[in-house]
Amino acid sequence: MQNWPSWIPTPRFWVNAIALILLIIGLQYAIAYLGMIIFMLIHLLPRVIFLKLIYLFSLVAQLSPIIVVAFVHHWLHRFLDNFFPESRVPETESAPGVFPSLLSWWEGLYGWSVNIFSTVIAFGILGLFLPSPDLFNLLTLFKNEVPHLQTISIFIQVVIAAYLYQFEYLVHQHLIAARQ
């Protein structure tokens, strides 16, 4: 991949982007179902405690992608290091143990921000080319009233996420070169 142009993401970044978007989509569905169950359970509590628990759950739900991506990154690299040692990237170190290393936490935070940026940019692009009042109504996305909008949005998110991962890699390589 040495002859790969720097303005086109390598297959590694496309795989990262696709895995991130699929992981976040699965996490969104899991949080939605878990949220319904928790809402039904804590609805029996007094109103003051109910509101505090709802705020706590929404905060945890917003930050959970960081934790999930960090743990997936850590365990995936442990799996790859054990079974495919030749696939290891030289600048990363593998942390033994159950909990992620600092690099995995960085990947979790960066994956979370890549998801946020790619979602905002995808909806912005769709808003420019498909000026529909239903575009920003999240209920129409889940009811599939706008055909193929979710597929187009996911495709745009993957492209933007791949370029954001490519950007992180180029900045990282530039910092390594500047340090030497």
Image (cartoon, grey):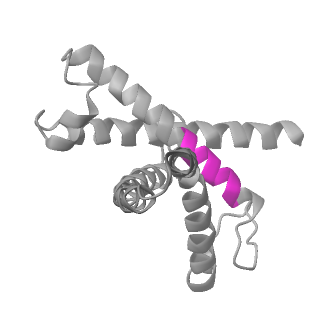
User: Residue reaching furthest bottom?
Assistant: 83
Indicate whether 51 appears above or below 35: above
Residue 36 percent location from the top left of the image:
35, 57
Residue 157 percent location from the top left of the image:
37, 38
Of 96 and 120, the residue lying toward us: 120
Residue under the image location 37 percent in, 62 percent down:
37
- Image label count: 0
Residue 13 percent location from the top left of the image:
49, 49
**Residue 87 visible here:** no
Direction from residue 102 to residue 155 in the image, left or right: left
Q: Is residue 106 magenta?
A: yes
Asked which quadrant contains residue 98, the reply is bottom right
Q: Quadrant of the C terminus?
A: top right
Asked which quadrant contains residue 90, the reply is bottom right
Residue under the image location 42 percent in, 28 percent down:
120
**Magenta span of residues:** 104-113
Residue under the image location 74 percent in, 37 percent down:
174
